[in-house]
Amino acid sequence: MRIRLIAAALCLTGGMASAQGSAPSVPLARGLTLVQTLRDEGADRESVVSLADASPTGVRYVWTFLEVSARGDTTRGRYERLVRQADLDTAPRWHQVYDRGQPPEHPGYTAFTISRAVFDQIGSAGSAPFSLLGFAESTVPQLAALGLAGGPALVRWRGTLTRVGSGTVPFPLLLDGKRVAVPALHLEGKFTARGESWAPHLWVLAQRDHPLILKLEDSRRVFQTVRADLGTAVADGARSLEGTLARSCRVEVPGIYFESASAVLNPASDETLIALARMLERHPDWTVTIEGHTDSIGTSAANAALSERRAAAVRARLTSQRIAPARLRAVGYGQTRPRESNSTIEGRARNRRVELLRPCGGSR
């Protein structure tokens, strides 16, 4: 069966490079991991995209996903997308869909960004011709979780992107687990295809060297980049987590990703879990409680059970790295300890998290 997948990389980068100032940046570099959420039909569905390689010739993205059938069967998928430097520089089109059986490269298209040429034209003229390859709006309701679809035809949406307002707007993002506001361009699209009209709003990172698509919103759904973990978060960041856990006895751990609505660890978590195991090896006297937390979507009982399974999955992975089981305890708190409001997509994403606690103080 042919499966198409909406590219989970809506990190819209639009804005003048000078508008960044000292604002946080999201480098187009190997090791960057993006978490995107599709809000549709009352549910948040997450997917994880990793930047597997970046060189002067282009970039390679890898998206892994878990598909769960109605019978409970699971299927893992792994998709790659290669974008050449020439297309990062000049392509006026965005290929929004993953397509099994197709080559990873689609010349003339970007995958997770707009091109620098489009970025520059919006900055100078306020608008730019733009097109994207995606699904017809009439078929969008047929899409299942994570944009999986078996049959809808692709269409070429043609039109323009126009800047809303004259400056940048702050956009909420979890960067290495910390809440920041990155500068973004708010854009309005006006597109037509096969007699249909579509007018989504997009937010693009105002960073010329990486104009990442941060959000796409229309009357039916919101597709948003909620998290960006840099490659340094695993190496240097692990040392930072170690210091925080030593001083404060509690730390929130970025870089651990689960498949949507499940306790299955995404492969993008592997390096972080290895780094945590090495940290615990350096401190053989530490015992650690692994806490799982969820957002408030679903029932309290279901969220409590999910958070317990997720904490247990982390514990199992660490014990497989030769950490003694007696040193690790797994508990789940479900939706009872939110960090942010569950009324927003980004708030719910922050509340879906893993924390570590060691018994050395009065931390909650």
Image (cartoon, helix red, strand yellow):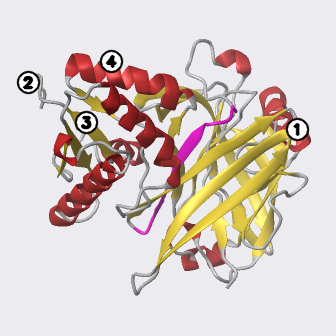
Mark 2 or mark 3, which is nearer the start of the sequence? Answer: 3
Q: Which residues are magenta?
A: 28-41
Question: Considering depth in this image, is 315 or 105 the residue closer to the camera?
Answer: 315
Q: Which residue is mark 4?
A: 243
**Contact? badges 2 and 4 (CB < 8 Å):** no
Q: CA distance from mark 1 to mark 4?
A: 38 Å
Q: Quadrant of residue 41?
A: bottom left
The reply to whether residue 255 is visible in this rendering is no
Name which residue type carries label 3: Leu
**Magenta-colored stretch includes residue 40:** yes
Res. 74 visible in picture? yes
Does the CB distance between marks 1 and 2 fall below 8 Å?
no
Whichever of callouts 3 and 4 sits on the residue coming sooner in the sequence is: 4
Tell me how far mark 3 sits from mark 1, CA to CA.
40 Å
As drawn, the label of residue 362 is 2
Which residue does the image show at 25% across and 48% down from the upper left?
293
Which quadrant: the C terminus?
top left
Where does residue 230 sit, x and y in percent of width and height? 56, 31
In the rendered image, the vertical position of residue 144 relative to residue 341, given as above or below? below
Q: Residues within 10 Å of mark 2 (few under 14, many from 20)?
A: few
Amino acid type shown at disc 1: Thr
Q: Residue 148 at x, y = what percent?
A: 58, 73
- In this view, which residue lies farthest toward the top? 22
Q: Which residue is mark 1?
A: 57
Secondary structure under badge 2? loop
Residue at 28% from the left image edge and 29% from the top image edge: 251
Q: State which tag comes first along the sequence, 1 or 2.
A: 1
5 lies left or right of 141: right
Name the spot of residue 82 as percent of width and height, x first.
80, 51
Foreground pick, 106 / 347: 106
- The residue that disc 3 covers is 356
